[in-house]
Image: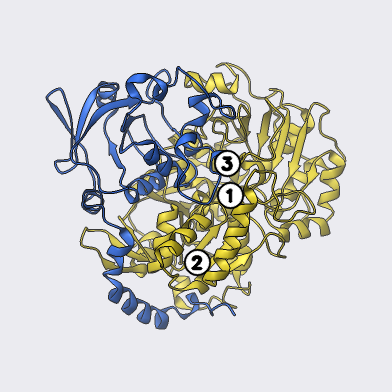
Chain colours: A yellow, B blue
Amino acid sequence: MAKTLFEKIWDTHAVADTAGGSTLIAIDRIFLHERTGAAALARMAEKGRKVRDPARVFAVMDHIVDTRLGRGDGTLMPGGEGFITETRAACRLADITLFDVNDRDQGIVHVISPEQGVVLPGCTLVAPDSHTCTQGAFGALAWGIGSSEAEHAMVTGTLRLERPKTIRVRFDGPLAKGVTPKDMILALIARHGAGGGAGHVVEFAGEAVRALDMEGRMTLCNMTTEFSAMSGMIAPDEKTFGYLAGRPYAPATFDEPYWASLRSDEGARFDREIAIDAGSIAPMVSWGTSPEHTIAITDAVPEGPKRAHDYIGLVAGTALKGTPIDAAFIGSCTNSRISDLRRAAAILKDRHISPEIRKALVVPGSLGVKRQAESEGLDAIFEAAGFEWRMSGCSLCFYAGGEGFPEGSRVISSTNRNFEGRQGPGIRTHIASPETVAASAIAGAIADPREYAREEPPA
Amino acid sequence: MSEFPQPLAGIAAPLHVERLADNVDTDAIIPSREMRSTGRTGLADGLFAPWRYRNADARESNPDFVLNRPEYCNAQILVAGRNFGCGSSREHAVWALAEYGFRAVLAESFAPIFRGNCIRNFILPVALPREVLESLAAEAVEIDLAAQVVLHQGQAYRFEIDAEAKRMLAEGLDAIDLTLTQGNAIDEWTRADRIERPWIYLEPVQ
């Protein structure tokens, strides 16, 4: 019988049925971070429970770590250091591989897992982090869980799951010039709602998806959690295998028949199908306090929930383009990889951000990305333009009580969440692509990146 | 925290703005800056901090916020709109709700990670149509998990919950202990899988 990619991975990992009618699904890879992972490890220690296979559990320091140059364990967040030192001690006790604060390969979990070849096509991978779905870009079933489920996965090597439904989202035809994967996922959420994928796993397909490089595919899958889907995934192809082959934790080659089988069969049935004309998508910017409050840069703010308008300070009918901003942020597991930085730098080269901008940060997704960017001179471009160049981490994707944006700031941000208070109390966030952030920082107001595009970024 | 009380009766506190709030995210339920230690406790004070306090740092109460009104001070049941608990996977959101005293959330729909976290912490997530939720808001209701109904003024509103989640809630079962009863099946599967997919296994850390 014809099967979807999801069904193949599910069937490969089904260990047993439970008495209650769910399925024990084997978990191949587990990631922890110092924010929620420490809680899981502490609880396990309390209960005398052991990690079943520590070689397949990894931990990172990304959520709380300081991103200022010369950092140590200390953080601007009160009490932050405790998360770091406790996680380190717990990982050592449990024999878990840790990418520590200043390790060569430190970075955001969903940036370094692929860099290290930890995620593999066809594997199951979980982390107590909602954006774990990013890694579905490699044809894995990767999803975010809570701390209790992380304990369950570590102790038993499985999770108890109800089988989710499936949606295929096809982006037909090519993207228009100046439109990015960030705009694709924002367009999907804007059209189908922040709860539109609940209960489902999404498979992304279609010409515009196949055309994306691996970093673009990660951006697309990253925000399926903002669609309330369990995960997003893309069938692996030569780009996927080429990206992973030979990385530290990946096989040297992908020549087993298993790898080639990882695609939805002709005629496989999905519970739902969504088709989007890729060419109809424009650069997208959020206007409100949910990712579904997102419009094309050329559109006016629509009528939405009163509270969203009140918080963001924009009434219906206002043009988003030209709305003054106070700060700019390039980073996060959505858009902090080398190609993101190259495209933003191409716009910023030989330009300067507006004097109205009070804070502008570039936070590379990993120290590996940082080194690569520096070897290409991108750091110099960002700094000359007026951006601060940082160490890797989640940084101001969320406000943890330490570093923040200036009070009352309106921020243009390459992150994934525009929730009330997400980037700090009273901070108003507009999420968009790195190009839109760069263009807006130059303009001092929300800007259309296509008006700032120049030559193609270097390959 | 233990098994879900049967039945659970009390006032249903409506998370209102101008209507039942949609897309209530876990950053609103417990902001990152309110998660001050690696433990699971000490979180109730930060629950809904951005809305509950006029000034969260000074803990200056916002008298307009629903949970600050006297009629809801002991509320165990919360009512909201669609996609409740979206955003960050932080289980702290559920721990904060539980520590505050909530035992059930009635909403039009739930974000999946939040819903799973509820079950693991014996908080009952009940999905009901919007018009029903609106009729229950601010009312005294009773939730009967065994019968899968919410009772209000002689009406019984049925809700769906999978058999396993229902049993875990009703009996206060620990998922890990339950799964370990199938430890032999897991071991057997792993032995076969090591032959089938050797590449998925990694060498122990030295």
Chain to which the residue tagged by mark 3 belongs? A
* First of labels 3, 1 by sequence position: 1
Residue assigned mark 2: A121
Of residue A386 and residue A3, the one placed in the foreground of this image is: A386
Relative to B206, is A292 on the left or the right? left
Relative to A34, is B178 on the left or the right? left
* First of labels 3, 2 by sequence position: 2
The image shows residue B79 at horizontal and vertical percentages of 33, 29
Residue assigned mark 1: A219
Q: Are marks 2 and 1 on the same chain?
A: yes
SS at circle 1 = helix
Distance between the Cα atoms at labels 3 and 1? Answer: 10 Å
Q: Residue at x 60, y 63 (%)?
A: A88
The image shows residue A154 at horizontal and vertical percentages of 43, 66
Residue assigned mark 3: A416
Q: Nearer the viewer, mark 3 or mark 2?
A: 3
Q: Which mark is residue A269?
A: none
Residue A136's place in the image compared with A54, above or below, is above
Q: Quadrant of residue A370?
A: bottom right
Relative to A103, is A376 on the left or the right? right
SS at circle 2 = loop
